[in-house]
Image: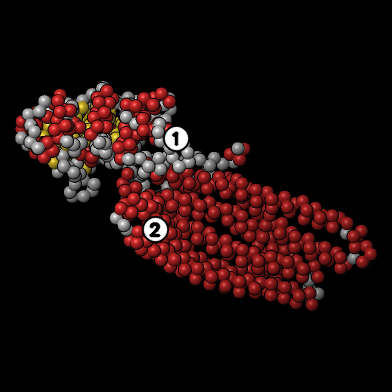
Amino acid sequence: MWQGKFINPYQYSEGEPPQTLGRFYIWCLHGSFPLIFIGCMMSMIAGSLEVFSALILGLVIDSAVSSDLNNIFSDNILLLAGAVVFFLVIRPFAFGGSSYINSVLIGPNINSLVLSRLHRHTMDQAISFFDDDFAGRISQKQLQASRAISETVNEFVNVISFAMASLVGSFLLLVSIDYRIALSLIVWLFCYIFLIRWFLPRIRKRSAQRAGARSMLSGQIVDTITNIRTVKLFAHNRYEDRAALDALENFRGRTTEFGLVASSFRYFLMLLSGFLPVILVGGSLLLWTNDLATTGDIAATGSVAIRIAQMSGWVSFVLMAIYSNVGEAEDGMRTLAHPHQLVDIPGAMEVPKLEGNIEFKNVSFRYGREIGGVSNIDLRVKPGEHIGLVGESGAGKSTLVTLLMRLYDPEGGEILIDGHDIRNMTQESLRNQISMVTQETAMFNRSVWDNIAYGKPKATQEEVFEASRQSQAHEFIVNMEDRFGRTGYDAHLGERGVKLSGGQRQRIALARAVLKDAPILILDEATSALDSTVEAYIQDALRQIVIGKTVIAIAHRLSTILRMDRIVVMHEGNIVEQGTVDDLLAKGGVFSQHWEKQVGGFIGIDPDADNQIMTKAG
């Protein structure tokens, strides 16, 4: 659209959002100030024309009073024609242009500009940022802050600029009548400013509290709905209802507090506004009785007084909305304007293609705590090597692969791929080289096609179908249908894939990883939700998929890692054993204990006979 010449609603802003309110606004609005300036100028022109309306009214009345009744129109033809042009052409054009700039150019574009910047900044946050908050609350804060900032700009351009121009023009008009009338406007204006300064900080504070309570309510409701299956299974409808009511009561209380301050402000404002016509009109009448003012002056002063009195209520309401929006923007800033904890270093390299030579050197990570995580890990995985990670829950297996994906940075040591510290690589190029299938498979509420093609967005139809076949997913996909009648690969999966069984979700996740075809493949309990028959098919498919790839497979079911080149055993965050299945069983250590628990002491196994073992272990 041609409006894009004035502002790019999706342009990036430099650096991270500041954590002080004024600079935060500047960061959000950077690039839009020329357009805002144009909007302010147009609004000020419209505001100035309101004063001209009163001036023209006064001139027409004075001309009418001083003219002969039979010659009013003929004697004042130019004045009356000018008034007609002013009211029917100039004034509508100025107001229409101001409204167009504000409603078409400023409003939609600035909201998109701010929201896109906040969303990008949030997307680049480390995983820990999302782990510590509600998903619903974070999204609510993005929408809240962008709307609040956009409305602040809208109201400033549309009302404040208009009002300032009107007040300046009105003051000059009153000065032309009598300086004492103008001084009475100044005195009233100081009282008005005092009222604003006393109430608006309190309104801003109550607004921020109300916004915080609203976001907590939203977070509570979203959290309940997101986990509705668990709520139903534990019969906790009443428990969740009570939690929602507690959050709702807090929101109701904060809203009531805001309403009390707002209504008090409105009352005193209307009281003060009532004084203005009394002072200005009364003063002009007093001057008229002393032949110091004309009839037209009285009309112009009255018009200005009533207009300013009406406008003061309008402006105060807008100022209250602006302060309310500022409070909400500040509340959103506190949540969203956190510096990124995990960033690419300056000059980080784009990794075109990795061979998959992985090395952990004395790596430690405990999530900032004293216990948990991993300690002093030394491990090397050769290109094309397939290793299995085993150990009890909490041993550090998932932490190790999470560090490899650089979702966190090690607290000690370093991780190298092909001899390069992964902290020297861009995060996106690193993760593009790694495919991962997790136990808790993530699905988007999009079509099956979109979920699989997420691994390779430009994949052909045949590539997607082939990846699905290799993952044993194609057959059930073609028979799917959602509630809107979409079938097969066009069917939508519901939020987080709730319409699929655990095994179906894992097969689609496998298809996504197969399609990505990255040189490093991580399987974190990737077949845990599959029944034995399907798992056997998947294992056969995986034997073809993993050829030439570096594979790290985490498994509790030891039958799934029998064909690995090497088994790495973890215990309490440390690597305690490494070797082939035969070596570890012969050693009689931790792995042997896990083995005996799962296969009932069936030892002396030939790794090539894994199907026999699976049958025996089942």
Residue depicted at x 93% and y 62% = 71
Image quarter (top left, top right, bottom left or bottom right) of the N terminus: top right
What residue type is disc 1 on? Answer: Thr
Q: Earlier in the sequence, mark 2 or mark 1?
A: 2
Q: Residue furthest right?
A: 70
* Front-most of residues 252 and 485: 485
Question: Can residue 312 be seen here?
Answer: yes
Characterize the local packing of mark 2: few (<14), some (14-19) or many (20 or more) Cα atoms within 10 angstroms.
many
Residue 325: x %, y % from top left: 50, 58
Question: Which secondary structure, mark 2?
Answer: helix
Residue 568: x %, y % from top left: 15, 33
* Viewer-side label of 2, 1: 1
Quarter of the image where one finds residue 380: top left
Residue 280: x %, y % from top left: 70, 72
Residue position for label 2:
216
Question: Can residue 19 be seen here?
Answer: no
Residue 487 tag number:
1
Residue depicted at x 69% and y 72% = 277
Characterize the local packing of mark 1: few (<14), some (14-19) or many (20 or more) Cα atoms within 10 angstroms.
some
Residue depicted at x 50% and y 40% = 11
Q: In screen coordinates, is 382 left or right of 318? A: left
Residue 442: x %, y % from top left: 34, 40
* Front-most of residues 563 and 156: 563
Image quarter (top left, top right, bottom left or bottom right) of the C terminus: top left
Determine whether 210 is above or below 97 in the image.
below
Question: Which secondary structure, mark 1?
Answer: loop
Q: In screen coordinates, is 221 left or right of 542? A: right
Q: In screen coordinates, is 435 left or right of 449? A: left
